[in-house]
Amino acid sequence: MSACAGPAAIQLSRIMRPDDANIAGNVHGGTILKMIEEAGAIISTRHCNSQAGERCVAALARVERTDFLSPMCIGEVAHVSAEITYTSKRSVEVQVNVLSENILTGAKRVTNRATLWYVPLSLKNVDKVLEVPPIQYALKELEEEGKKRYEEQKLERLVTKQRNGDIIFPVINPEPYTVGYSQSSLIHLVGPSDCTLHGFVHGGVTMKLMDEVAGIVAARHCKTNIVTASVDAINFHEKIKKGCVITISGRMTFTSNKSMEIEVFVDADPFVDEPKERYRAVSAFFTYVSLSKEGKPLPVPQLLAESEDEKRRFEDGKGRYLQTKAKRQVQMQPLTQQ
């Protein structure tokens, strides 16, 4: 159901090519996340400039939990549609759906659903957040539901920021299946092609790099083909400027019988004419599953948590896993009762 009579939904389409996929032919989760963010950025920026006034670019602030419902393959066409579903005074909620189309048979299936939050930043002053034009809701209930989602994500962002002091250190001669054995890092210099009109990195570029690191951690742990199953909320705490060197670090936090949770940080080092010290820019949890050559789920080796911090993170991850599992069971009940 459409929530607003404002800007029409937009759709981006692109055929998936070999460089979008892993060795098994499944499209990288990061490729899909980048397309999701591009669609969200276009529609939110368009809406925020729909009235006379100061021009702006919408910047990604948060991505809610995103489930990868079905893998996408080389040769299929990804159709990414985006629609604005709620606006607060200074933020925009965008709902995005991804369809995969087999252009040989015409068959289509839903692969992803995501919710993203954007804030409009002035083109004249990047530190100035502008007001968002309101949208018209088809029903009052839709506005109330959107307001509830807005308050929930606002609170969760604060909680996430409080635990952002962790640093991932290298481990010498780690044992297999320990946290240190699979943890990985990637260093990237932010160039012009990575950035928006403001000269700050696109959220989609960051998410793609985060997915790459999380995928390396998962593959190192289980030594099999892996695919992204879901991404917990991705929080963009601070902007990353062109010329920064970013370090994307990932570590295993929890394993169930068939899934792996990986925590990913993005730290930024201002490089040129900047007195600012290294800072935490983005954080998220990625969940992966292990697959056989035939694409069937495989058991995941149990993570060996050694230190007290690792054991605590394992229990925290277990809590998130059980909470998600309970939510899915609740969502499935109406379907089984039909």
Image (tube, rainbow, N blue to C red):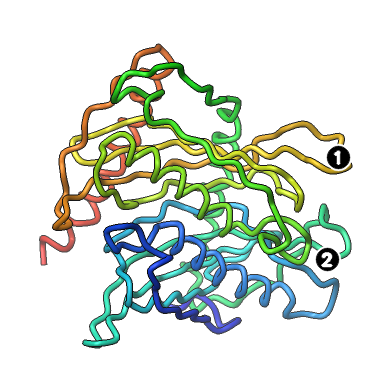
Image quarter where the N terminus lies is bottom left
Position in image of residue 13 (x %, y %): 45, 80
Instruction: Classify 10 Å Cα crowding around label 1: few (below 14), some (14-19), many (20 and above).
Output: few
Between marks 1 and 2, how big is the CA–CA gap?
20 Å
How packed is label 2: few (under 14 Cα within 10 Å), some, or many (20 or more)? some
- Eyeballing the image, is 158 above or below 206? above
Q: Are marks 1 and 2 in contact (CB under 8 Å)?
A: no
Residue 107 is drawn in which quadrant? Answer: bottom left
Q: Amino acid at mark 2?
A: Leu
> Going 76% across and 49% down the picture, which residue do you hit?
243
User: What is the x, y in percent for residue 303?
Assistant: 28, 26
Q: Front-most of 237 and 264?
A: 264
- Judged left or right of residue 129, residue 169 is left
Q: Which mark, by number, is residue 123?
A: 2
- Residue at 62 percent across and 46 percent down: it is 188
User: Residue 44 at x, y = what percent?
Assistant: 63, 70
Judging by the rendered image, the residue that carries numbered circle 1 is 274
The image quarter containing residue 265 is top right
In the visual, does 310 lie left or right of 260? right
Picture coordinates of residue 306, whole percent (x, y): 35, 14
- Image quarter (top left, top right, bottom left or bottom right) of the C terminus: bottom left
